[in-house]
Image (tube, rainbow, N blue to C red):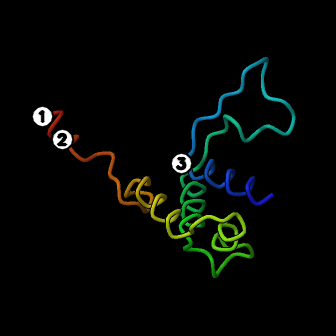
Amino acid sequence: MLLRLLADAIYQADLGPSVRRQGPGPRAGAGRFGARRRPAQIVAARRWLAGELDDQVRLPIAFVCDALGLDAGMLAAAVRARAPIHLGGKSDPWVGFASKTS
């Protein structure tokens, strides 16, 4: 259950691999796959994964990582490194864009 929670949070944070269904279409209960994520939803998931919400939620990421044998600090660093600045991270997808277009 905790592993599924972590995987869902990574998906919600738009940090995991793209999931595409093969076949005739979405089944009942599979609405999250292919659904567009809102920026607020992405930011909330990334903040939870980074441990910024541990004092505000019933299930802190530190507990989840500890139960799964993961390092919460390493997870937080990875989340911050992959998140664009406008979503609270360190990477900026627009770096060098102006020099490439001018």
Residue found at the far front of this picture:
69
Q: Which mark is residue 102?
A: 1
**What quarter of the picture does the C terminus occupy?**
top left
Q: With 69 as the anchor, is 14 left or right in this view?
A: left
Label ID, residue 34: none
Question: Of marks 3 and 1, which one's residue comes earlier in the chain?
Answer: 3
Q: Position of residue 83 (x, y in %)?
A: 44, 54
To which quarter of the image does residue 56 belong? bottom right
Distance between mark 2 and mark 1 Cα atoms: 6 Å
Mark in the foreground, 3 or 1: 3
Q: Is residue 14 above or below residue 65?
A: above
Q: Secondary structure at mark 2?
A: helix
Foreground of the two, 78 or 84: 78
Tell me if label 2 and label 1 are in contact, CB under 8 Å: yes
Amino acid tagged 3: Leu
Residue plotted at (14% across, 39% down):
99
The residue identified by callout 2 is 98
Of tags 2 and 3, which is closer to the observer? 3
Q: Amino acid at mark 1?
A: Ser
Residue 76 percent across, percent down from the top left: 50, 65
Q: Quadrant of the N terminus?
A: bottom right
Residue 15 numbered mark, or none: 3
Q: Amino acid at mark 2?
A: Ala
Residue 55 position in % (x across, y down): 63, 82
Q: What kind of element bears circle 3? A: loop
